[in-house]
Image: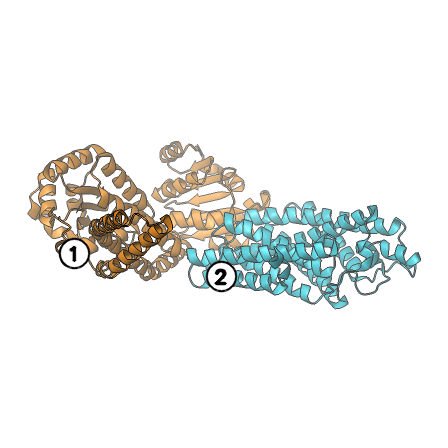
Chain colours: A orange, B cyan
Amino acid sequence: MNVVVLSCNHHHAGLEVREKLAFASEEQLMRAYAQWQQQHPKSELVVLSTCNRVEIYAASDEDSVELSSQQITDFVSLFHNLPSDEFTSSVLYHHGEAAVEHLFEVVCSLDSMVLGEPQIVQQVKEAYRIAQENSSCGLLTNTLFQQALSVSAKVRTNTKLSEGRVSIASVAVGDFGRSIFNRFDNKVVLVIGAGEMAEETLRYLKDEGVKRIIVVNRNRHRADALAAQFGGVTDDFENLEKLLGEADVVVSTTGATETLIDHDRFAKVRQASDRKPVFILDLGAPRDFASTISQIDDNVFLYDIDALEATCDRNRQLRVSEVQHAKKIIRQQTDRFMHEVYHRATGPVIQRLREQWSNISRSELDLLCRREPDLTDSQRAAIEKTIHRIVNKLLHPPLETLKDEAKVGTPHGLLDAIRQLFHLGE
Amino acid sequence: MAFLSKVQLSCFLLSYLVAFGGELFQLLRHRSGMARGITILAAAAGLLAHTAYLVTRSSDSGLPPLIGSSHDWFLVLAWLGAFFYLILVATHRRLALGLFLLPSILSLIIMALFVDDVLADSVREKNAVHRWGMLHASTLVIGLGTVAASTMCAVMYLLQYQKLRGQSSWLHRLQLPSLERLNSFIRWLVVSTVIMLTVGLATGFILVMVGQQPPDGSFSWKDPLVAGTSIVWLTMVSALCRILARKEQTGRQVARLTLMAGGFLLVTVLGLTLLSGGIHGSSPGNVGEMIVSPPESSLVQSR
């Protein structure tokens, strides 16, 4: 088995290098696959190109095919028309078992910028799909990538690596919002301010099915733009109190230097409303809502940046604590994969050996039957069974030795010895 | 299928205990596919054994389990809990509902060990009154089940509330349904409880009035279940009235009210039942026995 990977990722390469090595479009990937097949017709290739990494997996199931890191470097250099010394110091190369383990770590998002992020699985699936469509996959890459996706599922099921959200907006909506409300499609969302945080939070709320969005901002143009982006409406800042009474979810991200809604003002709002649950995300710094408003009644749920950040930190810690557990699973799965690959290499020799011995025993049996025509069917069956048992018993020790040796690598020496000893040919 | 008849109560008690251990492990250590698989497998094995046990008892007595004895009542309630647990655990894999359901199931099974499991001869005769008795028993059992479920939801609501208010750091490990959903469940469960207990009580009194007088001719309000269920009914009706009448009540207030009402009533009914040795089991002549093991007893005696 021959697997080599060139890995250019956010750990070792800056954005300017990653940009130069990236395969930005499917069309570019198609050209890359065509070019690779022209240069290395007997090998397989899968390219994974995302904003954080460019990984090129080259593989060959045939021992006669030589694959080296230099070949991949030359290919990348030629394809991107980029001198190799501009990127070789920023990339890593892994060979054989290390390459397999690296892919498993990548697909399980142990190597991602945000530990445990789920997008990488889709990105690997997509890369594999494109490679398949370009006839660039073979037996080894097919097995390798299918196994990688299966390892990813296993790690996600058996660890808490992907649990807990780690961005402010996702924690706000996914952890707190969904713990308060069962559904969002019947909720009114009031956005005060039109900054980036408001936009990100709205994206998550929209994913949850929010339909009614009202944006208020002192600068009406920015409010209009944000509302248009998410299918909402805008209103005047002067109507804020009325709108607060109607809202189920309030996202506040103004750049106000003083508290926008104090305790008394919000208490009046609550008195005038039916005191339904209200979920307030105060993402402003300094805060837009007085912290005491959460004490007005049981149904006021107020969260500021610090509360959300504390949850993010806790979730990050939880993920980090799962890394060792995930690595253990990956190690086991890598060993298993390598063993299967090595064992597969012994398959043709074992098959030929079995066929040869089976043919010999059959011809000897036929000879015996011709010499002894009086043998009954039951006698013949008994002799046949005995010969079969003898063949199996004789084959057992060499096959077991092969199996044991295949646990640590393809047993080339032993396979050659068997071929020569039993005249199996190449 | 002869082995099914050999199933003991301890078989499913232990299975549910293993399932509860699995839930605790997933909460305190780490969630894994294997732990979840073992939990579900243990609960499913428990439910199978539980079903076999009830079916065997039912076929031995020729009666549905509900009207067999107090022992069966508790076990039927536990069976319903285990059945819902398996559905919920399969459909809501992230929610820690087993931490609430399984202890209740285990408590019911343990309580079943301490109550009367002898079938009264009087319940064996079948006639129209027998069917009323069945309806009476079923609605009361389901009513008590919904009281337990509403109490459980109220506990979950209050824990979820505490978690959202950041009042307990350990609660972040606990995955519970949203406050909105729990609030809706509590309201529906309180309504269902009132309906079930009303039907249960009404059918009980109908059974008495249909002419099945107890041997000593007296109607005893002291029967644990009659007294307990009447208190349950009155309290639940008043709780329902409060919940429905005051719309501005917050979910937390509703949960507290439900928890207090449901918890007190469960303790009262189950406590009285345990102390008296079984539902309608304290005195052979009381009206309670007339309700569940109806009328036939007095008929037999009068003959």
Q: Chain of mark 1?
A: A
Q: What's the residue at 11%, 38% (across, down)?
A: A79
Does residue A336 appear anywhere in the picture? Answer: yes
User: In the shown orientation, is residue A21 left or right of residue B16?
Assistant: left
Query: Residue A418: which disc?
Result: 1
User: In the shown orientation, is residue B184 left or right of residue A362?
Assistant: right
Residue A71: % across, % down? 9, 45
Residue A20: % across, % down? 14, 42
Closer to the camera in the image, A18 or A151: A151
Residue type at tag 1: Ile
Q: Which residue is mark 2?
A: B22
Residue A302: % across, % down? 48, 51
Question: Against A278, is B24 above or below?
Answer: below
Closer to the camera in the image, B41 or A394: A394
User: In the shown orientation, is residue B184 left or right of residue A71?
Assistant: right
Say what secondary structure mark 1 lies in: helix
Residue type at tag 2: Gly
User: In the shown orientation, is residue A53 left or right of residue A153?
Assistant: left
Residue B4: % across, % down? 61, 57
Q: Residues within 10 Å of mark 2 (few under 14, many from 20)?
A: many
Closer to the camera in the image, A395 or A217: A395
Does the residue at mark 1 contact the one at mark 2 (Cβ under 8 Å)? no
